[in-house]
Image: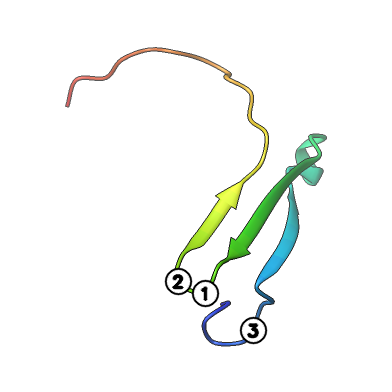
């Protein structure tokens, strides 16, 4: 969306509101790469064999 001009080079998006969890995702475009950031919480740990 950034490369097509539908989103700015930097923005913060909210997620999880309908689940009662207010989360924010930070999106940055440095002219070459898109960087995604934000805080996270580990809900479970484990391994999977595929």
- Secondary structure at badge 2 equals loop
Residue at x 17% of width, y 27% of height: 50
Q: Position of residue 26 (x, y in %)?
A: 68, 53
- Secondary structure at badge 1 equals loop
CA neighbours of label 2 inside 10 A, class few (<14), some (14 to 19), many (20+): few
Q: CA distance from mark 3 to mark 1?
A: 15 Å
Q: Position of residue 27 (x, y in %)?
A: 63, 59
Marks counted in the figure total 3
- Secondary structure at badge 3 equals loop
According to the picture, the residue beneath numbered tag 3 turns out to be 6
The answer to whether residue 38 is left or right of residue 49 is right
The answer to whether residue 25 is left or right of residue 17 is left
According to the picture, the residue beneath numbered tag 2 turns out to be 32
What sort of colour scheme is used for the picture? rainbow
Q: Are marks 1 and 2 in contact (CB under 8 Å)?
A: yes
Residue at x 45% of width, y 13% of height: 45
Q: Position of residue 1 (x, y in %)?
A: 56, 77
Residue at x 67% of width, y 34% of height: 39
Mark sitting on residue 22: none
Q: CA distance from mark 1 to mark 2?
A: 4 Å
CA neighbours of label 3 inside 10 A, class few (<14), some (14 to 19), many (20+): few
Front-most of residues 33 and 16: 33
Q: Are marks 3 and 2 in contact (CB under 8 Å)?
A: no
CA neighbours of label 1 inside 10 A, class few (<14), some (14 to 19), many (20+): few
Q: Nearer the viewer, mark 3 or mark 2?
A: 2
According to the picture, the residue beneath numbered tag 1 turns out to be 31
Q: Earlier in the sequence, mark 3 or mark 2?
A: 3
> Which corner quadrant of the image does residue 32 belong to?
bottom left
Q: CA distance from mark 3 to mark 2?
A: 17 Å
Residue at x 80% of width, y 44% of height: 17
Give the residue at the far left of this rendering: 50
Q: Position of residue 19 (x, y in %)?
A: 76, 37
């Amino acid at each position: 969306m950034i490369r097509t001009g539908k989103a700015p080079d930097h923005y913060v998006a909210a997620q999880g509101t309908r689940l009662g969890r207010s989360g924010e995702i930070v999106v940055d475009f440095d002219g070459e790469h898109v960087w995604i950031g934000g805080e996270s919480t580990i809900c479970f740990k484990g391994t999977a064999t595929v």
